[in-house]
Amino acid sequence: MKNILIIRSASMATMDKLINYLKENNKNQNVYCLIQKGSMKTFKEKYLHIKYIEKEDGFFKYEEFKHNLYLKNTLNSINFDDIYIPSSYIDFPNFQDTFMIASKINCKKYILFNMDGEVQEQKLSFVSLWIDKYLGEVIYFIKVLFALIGIFIIYIFAYPYYFIKRTVFRN
């Protein structure tokens, strides 16, 4: 029996597409859904076959997740084969926290599912996600700084060469 976790990070329309996709492509499965309290009733009425793991309302925030020991223990007590992360968009904007949470759950494979129903397997590394989230702006600033220094150095050497060439070979 295959264990699948869906992190409810998308609109109801995208979730419907994902659940229908799972029904068509995976026959022998236990489907779990990490879901906000406010959405629980609607989903329980619509999808009876899914087991729900409840979290507090609001966006998925890694800082909240790491302090919620009950939720962490519940999720890590189950060995998931796949974790599906749906998005209401074509890409995954501002999903760093959701990816960080998913990377801390025991799982063999992480799968991204967008609003068009496109499926993409993804490798999630907590360290690289953390660096991207917390140090990304600093790293960007350093890259820009080095680019400006490089341009300045090129200008320092190229301008005298151009000046000498123009004055010496002025015919």
Image (tube, helix red, strand yellow):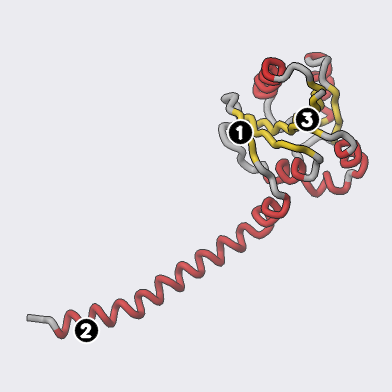
Residue 30 place in picture, x, y as percent: 82, 23
Label whose residue precedes the other's in the sequence (2 or 1): 1
In the image, 71: left or right of 16?
Answer: right
Q: Nearer the viewer, mark 2 or mark 3?
A: 3
In front of the other: 80 or 87: 80
Q: Quadrant of the N terminus?
A: top right
Residue extending farthest to the left is 171
**Residue at 91% in and 44% down:** 69
In the image, 169: left or right of 101?
Answer: left
Image marks 2 and 3: residues in contact by CB distance under 8 Å: no
Q: How many marks?
A: 3
CA–CA distance in space, label 1 to label 3: 15 Å
Q: In the rendered image, which quarter is residue 86 located in?
A: top right
Residue extending farthest to the front is 1
Q: Which amino acid, mark 1?
A: Gln
CA–CA distance in space, label 2 to label 3: 68 Å
Q: Quadrant of the C terminus?
A: bottom left
Label whose residue precedes the other's in the sequence (2 or 3): 3
Question: What residue is shown with label 1?
Answer: 120
Q: Is residue 160 visible?
A: yes
Q: Which amino acid, mark 3?
A: Leu
Is residue 1 depicted above or below 104 in this figure? above
CA–CA distance in space, label 2 to label 1: 57 Å
Question: What residue is shown with label 2?
Answer: 164
Q: Which amino acid, mark 2?
A: Ile
